[in-house]
Structure formats: structure tokens, C-alpha cells
Image (spheres, rainbow, N blue to C red):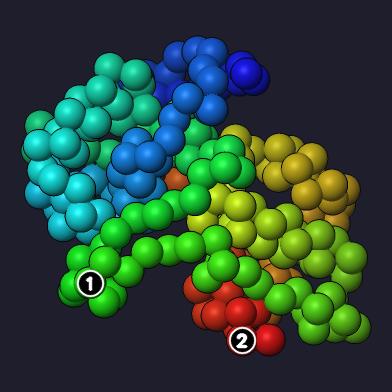
Amino acid sequence: MNIVNSTHLNSKGDNTQTVQFSPQKYRGHTLTILGVLTELGGLSTRQISDKTGIPVKVVYVYCSRGVEQGIIYRQESWGFAATSLGLKILSIAPSSYSHNTKVTQKQHKPNTITTEESRTVNLTSFSKREDLTEYDKQVVEMLSDHYCRTDVKYRLFGDHHEVGETFKIPESELQQTLRHLKEEGCIYVLKTPMGWKIGLMKGFIARLKEA
């Protein structure tokens, strides 16, 4: 079982501390709740339940446990939000995790389940584009692979050096590569208190699935 070092916000979401954790031990409802908190920010247990279909009492148990583990923190005494450690766990969730989250009727049809098949994307046409550099393609290929394995459209990075190392792009080419992919509507880049968040645009994913 792999052990990872991570510096993250504490259970209050403010001070940082360095801990060792094993991403493999987090699964099921924990990853589902972290996914919702990541996409939508701070939420009450009722809101989390409405988004995931998990009973409110069960949500509360998992959120309270998450606070103790440092992956979730209470937000202004009324709701919960993911810490940077929680985001890190979600971004490197094991490939065996298949985000089978039942969603409410307001979002999709009743009992719709996200399957690995629905996350399959076709990069054939994208890879053949002559207006893209090899670095452009590397970023999209790695983000697409991460999405297909984990159902998470983004990855979280501590700084631009980590971004370059992960995507294997020289620092001199990094900004131009990310800028070009943003202009093409392929990715978004956000600077958050948790670090750099780089992910695939929903519309771009839809185009890849239709290709």
C-alpha cells in the first residue's frame, strides 16, 4: 500500500500541516462526498444528500469522520468543505474506483449510474490535429486518462513546477501550452487556495465522446 506525504489545511481549513496518508483506503461514500464538495464547495448534509442520494444520517457520519481524518472541514459551523488533503485524495483516487454515484431526479433520470463505459473518450481525431503541439496532446491525454479511470475531470497541483513535472513539459513551454489549450476550449486553469486546478472542459469532453 503506497504512503503519500501531503501538506494540507487542518480540520478548520486554515493552518497547514504535513501528514502521511494512504489514498487506497478511501473509497465508496467518502470519494462520492468529496467529489460533490469539490465540484460545489461548502454544502450542508442535506445538500450533499440531495446531490448524491446518500441518506442524511449517513452523510453526517462520513463528514464527521472526514473532519477527524483531516480530509473535510466544517465551514462556518453550518456545512462541510473538502480540505486540500481531501482534494488530493480525490485527484489520485485508485483506478479501481468507479464513481457509481446515484443522483437525484432533478439532475438526471432516477437511479442513473455513472459507469466506466460512459467515461470513455475518443482521442483519435484530437491526436491527429496539426495545429496542436505534442505538449498540448500530452496534457489532454493525461487528463483524459485520469478522467476515464476516476471520473474526476481535473487534477490538483501544488505549484507550476509540479504541473510541468506531471505533464512532462519544460517550464519555458508550460504557460504557452496551457494558454493554447484554454483558447481552444479544451481545459480550464484555476488558482485556488488549495493549489492549481487544471481540468477538462465539459463541452470538450462531450465532443470527445461524440468523435
Counting from the top left corner in percent of width and height, residue 44 is at 13, 45
Q: Specify the amino acid type for callout 2.
A: Glu
Q: Specify the amino acid type for callout 1.
A: Pro
From the viewer's perspective, is 132 left or right of 2? Answer: right
Numbered disc 2: secondary structure: helix
Counting from the top left corner in percent of width and height, residue 73 is at 26, 29
Query: Sequence-wise, which precedes: disc 1 or disc 2?
Result: 1
Counting from the top left corner in percent of width and height, residue 69 is at 34, 19
Residue shown at the point (55%, 61%) measured from the top left: 116
Crowding at label 1, few (<14), some or many (≥20) Cα neighbours within 10 Å? few
Numbered disc 1: secondary structure: loop
Residue shown at the point (58%, 38%) measured from the top left: 94
Relative depth, front residue between 57 and 174: 57
Residue 92 occupies quadrant: top right
User: According to the image, label 2 marks what residue?
Assistant: 210
Quadrant of image for the N terminus: top right
User: According to the image, label 1 marks what residue?
Assistant: 110
Residue shown at the point (32%, 69%) measured from the top left: 112
From the viewer's perspective, is 199 left or right of 59? Answer: right
Relative depth, front residue between 22 and 138: 22
- From where the camera sits, is residue 36 visible? yes
